C-alpha cells in the first residue's frame, strides 16, 4: 500500500536571504488619542460621526489606544519575531491646519515610535498617507483641490526632515484607488462623496501628490527606499469567450491599470480615457512626468480577485456600466467574514504579471490578511482559518518568486484587531485579539504560527 506523503511544512528558509518579515497597521485604525496633544480632526473623525456611515456608530477616538501603549505593543511584536513594521502617520497630528504651523508634540510621538522600533531591532516602514486627510484641507476641496497635492509635499518635507536620519523606508500613499473611488465615487469611505468624475479627479491629484513628494523624500533622505502602495485585484473572465475576455481587460483598467500605468511611466490607459469621456480628470502639462517618478519599490496589498462577465455598455456614471462588465459572485468557494473569496493563486498571478509588465526594482507585499469570526474561548482564539490563509498566501508568494518576481518582503495585515473603517470594530483582521473595553491583547493562533514560523520551530 502506497503511503500518502504529507505536504511539506512551509519554512522561512525557503524564502530569499534578507527577506523582510513584517506586520502592519494604520494611524487612524489603532492610535486613538484623537483629541489629544494638538491633533485636529481628520476626514475619518468627521465621517465616523455621521449617522449610519460606520457600523454601530463606532469611531477611532480610542481604537487600540496605541498612542499610549506602543511600548508594550512593540514588545509583543518583537516576541513574535517580526523584523519590520509598516505603520502610517496622522497628517493632522503633525500639521493640525494641514500645512503651516507644526505641532511639535505630534512630531515627537512619531520620533518616539521610530526610536522604540529600532531599539527592538524592528525596521520601521512608514506610509505618509493612509486615508486620514486633515478635515481643514477637506473644507478647501480636499483631493478635488489640486492645492492638496502641494500641502502633501509640505507634510512630506516636514516628516522626512524630522525622521529621515533613522527612518529609511517611505511610502507616499496607501491604496489611492480606495481614497478616490470608495471615498468620492460610491461614498462608503470618507469624505463620503458620490460622483464618479470626482473620484477620477481625486485619483489624479492623489497620484500627483505622490509624484511631487518623491523628489522631496530623495532630497531629504538620500539613502531612502521610497515607493507607493497600490491594491490590485487581479481580474479574471467568467469564460473564455472573446466578450468576457475583453470585459475583463476593461475591468482590469478600472481596478489596476489606471494606477499602475501612470506610476510606471505609461500614462493613463488610452482605452479607459476614451471610455470615461466627460468623466476623465483634468490634468496639466508635466503631471504625468511627475507621477512617473522612479520607484525603489512598489507595495502591493492583496486580498482577493475579481471575476467579471461582459454586459451592455451604458452611459451612466458607474465604471462597470461605462466599461461594460458585471461582477460575478462565485458559489462554493472559500470566503472570509468580509465575503471576499480566498484565492491565493491570484497573488502569484499578479506578482508575476507585475514583474513582467512593469519591471519594478523591488516588490513588497505590504498587506495581506483576512477577517474571520474569531471566538474567544478560555482566553484563546484558535483562528485556524486565518492561519491557513497566511500559509496559503506565503506559499503563493514563494511560487511567484520562483517565476521571477522580485519580491523582497511580506507584511501581514494586521498586527492588531482595529477600527476597520466603515465596518467599525465588527471585522477583525488582527493576529492579536484586542478587547476594546479593557485594551487587553491576546495573541491568536495565527500570531503564534508566525512566531513559530519566523523562529523555525514547530507549533
Image (spheres, helix red, strand yellow):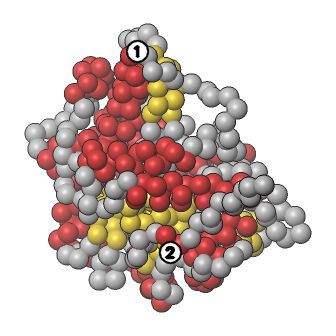
Q: Position of residue 296 (x, y in %)?
A: 26, 63
Q: Position of residue 377 (x, y in %)?
A: 87, 64
As drawn, which residue projects farthest toward the left?
285
Which image quarter: residue 444?
A: bottom right
As drawn, which residue projects farthest toward the front?
1
Report the residue marked by disc 2. Answer: 13
253 to 139, vertically: above or below: above
Q: Secondary structure at mark 2?
A: helix
Disc 2 crowd, CA 10 A, few/some/many (<14, 14-19, 20+): few
337 to 392, vertically: above or below: above
As rendered, which of 364 and 123 lies closer to the eye?
A: 364
As drawn, which residue projects farthest toward the bottom?
119
For marks 2 and 1 on the same chain, the one whose residue lies earlier in the sequence: 2
As drawn, which residue projects farthest toward the right?
378
Number of marks drawn: 2
Residue shown at the point (78%, 63%) measured from the top left: 382
The quarter in which the N terminus is drawn is: bottom right
As rendered, which of 162 and 172 lies closer to the eye?
A: 172
Q: Position of residue 417 (x, y in %)?
A: 66, 61
As rendered, which of 311 and 163 lies closer to the eye?
A: 311
Give the alpha-carbon distance from disc 2 to disc 1, as whole Å: 44 Å
Residue shown at the point (40%, 76%) measured from the top left: 17
Q: Disc 2 vs disc 1: Cβ atoms closer than 8 Å?
A: no
Q: Which mark is residue 135?
A: none
Which image quarter: residue 341?
A: top right
Residue shown at the point (18%, 63%) measured from the top left: 215
Q: Position of residue 401 (x, y in %)?
A: 40, 59
Report the residue marked by disc 1. Answer: 243
The quarter in which the C terminus is drawn is: bottom right
Residue shown at the point (36%, 27%) measured from the top left: 249
Amino acid at each position: 500500500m502506497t503511503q500518502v506523503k504529507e505536504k511539506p511544512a512551509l519554512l522561512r528558509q525557503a524564502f530569499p536571504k534578507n527577506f523582510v518579515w513584517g506586520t502592519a497597521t494604520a494611524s487612524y485604525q489603532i492610535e486613538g488619542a484623537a483629541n489629544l496633544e494638538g491633533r485636529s480632526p481628520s476626514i475619518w473623525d468627521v465621517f465616523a460621526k455621521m449617522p449610519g456611515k460606520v457600523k454601530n456608530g463606532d469611531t477611532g477616538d480610542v481604537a487600540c489606544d496605541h498612542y499610549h501603549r506602543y511600548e508594550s505593543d512593540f514588545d509583543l511584536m518583537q516576541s513574535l519575531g517580526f523584523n519590520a513594521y509598516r505603520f502610517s502617520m496622522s497628517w493632522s497630528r503633525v500639521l493640525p491646519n494641514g500645512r503651516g504651523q507644526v505641532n511639535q508634540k505630534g512630531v515627537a510621538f512619531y520620533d518616539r515610535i521610530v526610536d522604540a522600533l529600532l531599539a527592538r531591532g524592528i525596521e520601521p516602514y512608514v506610509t505618509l498617507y493612509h486615508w486620514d486627510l486633515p478635515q481643514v484641507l477637506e473644507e478647501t476641496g480636499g483631493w478635488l483641490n489640486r492645492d492638496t497635492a502641494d500641502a502633501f509635499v509640505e507634510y512630506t518635507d516636514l516628516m522626512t526632515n524630522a525622521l529621515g536620519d533613522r527612518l529609511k523606508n517611505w511610502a507616499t500613499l496607501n491604496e489611492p484607488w480606495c481614497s478616490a473611488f470608495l471615498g468620492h465615487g460610491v461614498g462608503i469611505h470618507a469624505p463620503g462623496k458620490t460622483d464618479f468624475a470626482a473620484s477620477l479627479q481625486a485619483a489624479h491629484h492623489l497620484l500627483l501628490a505622490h509624484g511631487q513628494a518623491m523628489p522631496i523624500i530623495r532630497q531629504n533622505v538620500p539613502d531612502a527606499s521610497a515607493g507607493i502602495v497600490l491594491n490590485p485585484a487581479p481580474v479574471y473572465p467568467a469564460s473564455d469567450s472573446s466578450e468576457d475576455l475583453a470585459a475583463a481587460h476593461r475591468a482590469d483598467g478600472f481596478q489596476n491599470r489606471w494606477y499602475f500605468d501612470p506610476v510606471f511611466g505609461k500614462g493613463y490607459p488610452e482605452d479607459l480615457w476614451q471610455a470615461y469621456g466627460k468623466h476623465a480628470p483634468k490634468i496639466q502639462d508635466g503631471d504625468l512626468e511627475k507621477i512617473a517618478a522612479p520607484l525603489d519599490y512598489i507595495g502591493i496589498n492583496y486580498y482577493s480577485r475579481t471575476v467579471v462577465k461582459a454586459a451592455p455598455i451604458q452611459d451612466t456614471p458607474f465604471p462597470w456600466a461605462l466599461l461594460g462588465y458585471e461582477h460575478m459572485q462565485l458559489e462554493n468557494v472559500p470566503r472570509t467574514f468580509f465575503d471576499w473569496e480566498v484565492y491565493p493563486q491570484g497573488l502569484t498571478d499578479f506578482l508575476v504579471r507585475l514583474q513582467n509588465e512593469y519591471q519594478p526594482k523591488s516588490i513588497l507585499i505590504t498587506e495581506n490578511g483576512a477577517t474571520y469570526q474569531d471566538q474567544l474561548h478560555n482566553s484563546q482564539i484558535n483562528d485556524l482559518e486565518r492561519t491557513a490563509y497566511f500559509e496559503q498566501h506565503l506559499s503563493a508568494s514563494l511560487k511567484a518568486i520562483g517565476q521571477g518576481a522580485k519580491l523582497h518582503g511580506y507584511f501581514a495585515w494586521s498586527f492588531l484587531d482595529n477600527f476597520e473603517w466603515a465596518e467599525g470594530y465588527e471585522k477583525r483582521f488582527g493576529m492579536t485579539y484586542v478587547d476594546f473595553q479593557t485594551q487587553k491583547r491576546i495573541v491568536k493562533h495565527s500570531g503564534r504560527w508566525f512566531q513559530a514560523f519566523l523562529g523555525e520551530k514547530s507549533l
